Amino acid sequence: MEITKSSENKIDKLVSCLPQENICGRPFVQYNGTWFPLLAIPGVISSQELFQADESEIIIAGLPKCGTTWLKALIFSIVNRNRYQPTESPLLSIHPQILVPSIEMDHFRDGLPQTIYQLSRPTISSTHVPYAFLPNSIITSNSRVVYVCRNPPDALVSYWHFRNSIMKHNNTSVQVEPIEEFFDQYCRGVQPYGPLWENILGYWNASVEKPESVLFMTYEDLKEDSMFQLKRLASFLGFPFSSEEEAQGLIQEISTLCSIGNLKNLEANQKVVHYSVVPGTSYFRKGEVGDYVNHLTPSMIETLNKLVEEKFAGSGLVFKSKLITTNSASE
Ligand SMILES: *[C@@H]1O[C@H](CO)[C@@H](O)[C@H](O)[C@H]1NC(C)=O
Ligand SMILES: *[C@@H]1O[C@H](CO)[C@@H](O)[C@H](O)[C@H]1NC(C)=O
Ligand SMILES: *[C@@H]1O[C@H](CO)[C@@H](O)[C@H](O)[C@H]1NC(C)=O
């Protein structure tokens, strides 16, 4: 559905009937079971029918704060490595969020198809929507979808910090709600693009059914064994590393270029303010595994543990880094 004046009214009407909650100071609505930022709804709806995936389109999917920015940098570098040496990569001067646009927030900002010039060949786009909400053309074309999944408590803590940094940037004396409130919403499944178990399992199922089209990765594996995971990623995308490239240290070079420490310190990423409200550095905090132990109480961690166990039981998906409750067990 293209957004015209009348469909705009239709969307307004639709939205006014949907359950609404504020999450970390931002309005969300529950549409067909998923909690979307109010702002994203027009883009989510119109892109479902109107987004035209290229034959070789690459889609990066994942919940917010689960590694999509990292994958944007990595995948851009992998598929364009014959056009740009790591030393002259556009990543050195353009924020990954701008280099790789979002379907619902950029391609269909406010529900209107935008003309976005993309440097990458093949083109790469990102999305946070569940698998069932993906634009039809992605399912029917030969697009490759890379999903990145992160340990739920780390994703929770990271999102909370992310929202705080946005609020502080706007007004230094404003803070989002205490993490306890967000935690309670989280456990009810009231999360951006969640419930997380629906979002994750939708892509997990798709990766089991169509492994040639959907690759399921985890943030923790990427941290732990970057070399292996980058090779796996490149092969899936149809851009496998040759043994010469490997011997030349190219995989390591790409890994270093895209590391959080490197991207965070680039002037371009520090200066930019994404969508006029998100400071570029907000996309790079610590990027650690297990940092949640410094923000959640043992009882919160236990609650999340139980929830995750229950929601993922029987799926075959196991979170590698078992949720832990003490600082000493922190990775
Ligand atoms: C920034 O702050 C102003 C005034 O305090 C407020 O009206 C506006 O909605 C805020 N913007 C964001 C993105 O939080
Ligand atoms: C910033 O937030 C504080 C606390 O909510 C408020 O009193 C103040 O008016 C805000 N500043 C601006 C410029 O909106
Ligand atoms: C994933 O697959 C399982 C087993 O077939 C099914 O029960 C579940 O509903 C699916 N979940 C999603 C979100 O697609």
Image (spheres, rainbow, N blue to C red):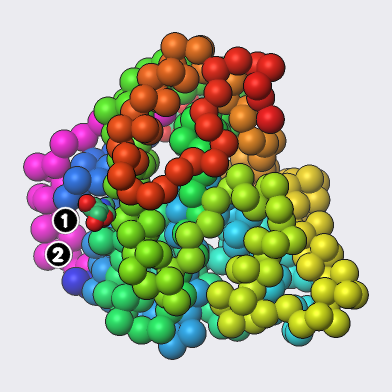
**Horizontal and vertical percent for residue 222?**
65, 52
Identify the element where label 2 is drawn: helix
**Residue 273 higher or lower than 235, as above or below:** above
Q: Residue at the spot x=71%, y=56% of the render?
A: 226
Of 224 and 113, the residue lying toward us? 224
Q: Residue at the spot x=62%, y=68% of the render?
A: 232
Could you tell me if residue 106 is visible in this image?
no
Q: Quadrant of residue 305?
A: top left
Identify the element where label 1 is drawn: helix
Of 266 and 215, the residue lying toward us? 215
Of 258 and 99, the residue lying toward us? 258
Q: Residue at the spot x=60%, y=62% of the render?
A: 72
**Horizontal and vertical percent for residue 262?**
80, 51
**Residue 155 higher or lower than 219, as above or below:** above
Question: Which amino acid lies under the numbered mark 2 shown in the image of this protein?
Answer: Ser
Residue 19 covered by magenta stretch: yes
Question: Which amino acid lies under the numbered mark 1 shown in the image of this protein?
Answer: Ile
**Contact check, label 2 and label 1, Cβ < 8 Å:** yes
User: Magenta segment range?
Assistant: 3-24
Residue 129's disc is: none
Q: Horizontally, is 143 left or right of 167 in the view?
A: left
- Please identify the quadrant where the C terminus is shown: top right
**Horizontal and vertical percent for residue 26?**
37, 34
Residue 11's disc is: 1
**Label 1 neighbour load within 10 Å: few <14, some 14-19, many 20+:** some
Residue 7's disc is: 2
